[in-house]
Image (tube, grey):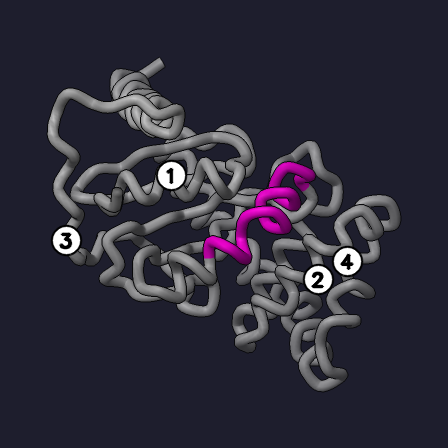
Amino acid sequence: MSWQRIQAGMIAIGLLAAVTYLSLGGHMAQAAPPKPQPQTVNVPDVDPHKAFGQKSAPVVLEIFSDFQCPACRQYYVGTNRQLLDNYVNTGKVYLIHRDFPLPMHAYSRVAARYARAAALIGKFEKVEDALFQNQQQWDQTGDVDGIVASALTSAEMTKVRALVKNDPAKLDALIEKDVALGRTYNVSQTPTSIFHANGQTYPYGGGIDYQFLKQFLDQLIGQK
C-alpha cells in the first residue's frame, strides 16, 4: 500500500471521526476550522452535462458510481435529491458524476455508454434517474435500451441509439477517462466519494446516509 493511500485514508478517517464525535454531542478542544473560501479545484475531464452546481463552490464532490451497483442506487435514491436541493443548488457543493463500471456487473458498461450518449445530447439527468430507479428490472433482463427509451422522447432516443451503435469506442474512451482518474484516487469500490475542500482531498468509499453526509459537508464548509 502506498504512502499516498495511507495518508489519504488517515485524513478521511480522522475527519469522519470528528464529524461523528460532534454529532454525538462531543466538543472539540481546538477551534472550529475556518470556512473554506470559494475555489476552483483543478479537476480534469469534467463533462458539463454530468456536473451540477457552481465550479466556485467551497466543496467539490466527485462520486464514482456504477449504474448496476445496488449501493450506488441507494446513494442516489436516498441521498442525491437532498444533496442537490440543499447543497448543490445553493452554491455550496459542485457535484460531478464519474463512471466506474465494475467488471462483476454484466450490464454496467452498457448502461454507462447509454448514460454517456445521453449526456452528449444534454439528457443525462433523465437517463441517470431511469437507470437507478429501474435498476432491479434491467439488472435481471439486461434491457438497458428499453429503460432509457422510457425516459426520452423518440427523437432523443434515436440520437442516443445512434451514438451507442455507431461510436461505442468514443463513449468507452470517455468512460475510461473516469476509470483512470478513479485509479489515481485508489477507488476500488462503488460508490466512492471524493471531497475537495480548502485545498485538501478526502476520499470515502461506500454509501453515505444523508444525515451523515450533511454533518460531513457542514464541517467542511465550516457551518455550526
Which amino acid type corresponds to the residue marked 4 in the rendered image?
Val
Q: Comparing marks 3 and 1, which lies closer to the viewer?
A: 1
Which amino acid type corresponds to the residue marked 1 in the rendered image?
Gln
Mark positioned earlier in the residue sequence (2 or 1): 2
Mark positioned earlier in the residue sequence (1 or 4): 4
Give the image location of residue 78, x and y in percent.
Answer: 61, 47
| Badge number at residue 37 | 3
Circle 2: element type: helix
Which amino acid type corresponds to the residue marked 2 in the rendered image?
Ala
Q: Residues within 10 Å of mark 4 (few under 14, many from 20)?
A: many
Q: Comparing marks 1 and 4, which lies closer to the viewer?
A: 1
Question: Which residues, given as a range, are shown in magenta?
Answer: 69-83
Distance between the alpha carbons at the discs numbered 2 and 3: 36 Å
Q: Is residue 70 magenta?
A: yes
Q: Main secondary structure of the magenta part?
A: helix
| Residue 149 higher or lower than 11, as above or below | below
Mark positioned earlier in the residue sequence (3 or 4): 3
Q: Check disc 2 and report the residue beneath it.
A: 130
- The quadrant of the rendering that contains the C terminus is top left
Residue beneath the point at 28% across and 50% down: 59
| Badge number at residue 144 | 4
Circle 1: element type: helix
Residue beneath the point at 25% across and 46% down: 223
In contact (CB < 8 Å): disc 4 and disc 2: no
In contact (CB < 8 Å): disc 3 and disc 1: no
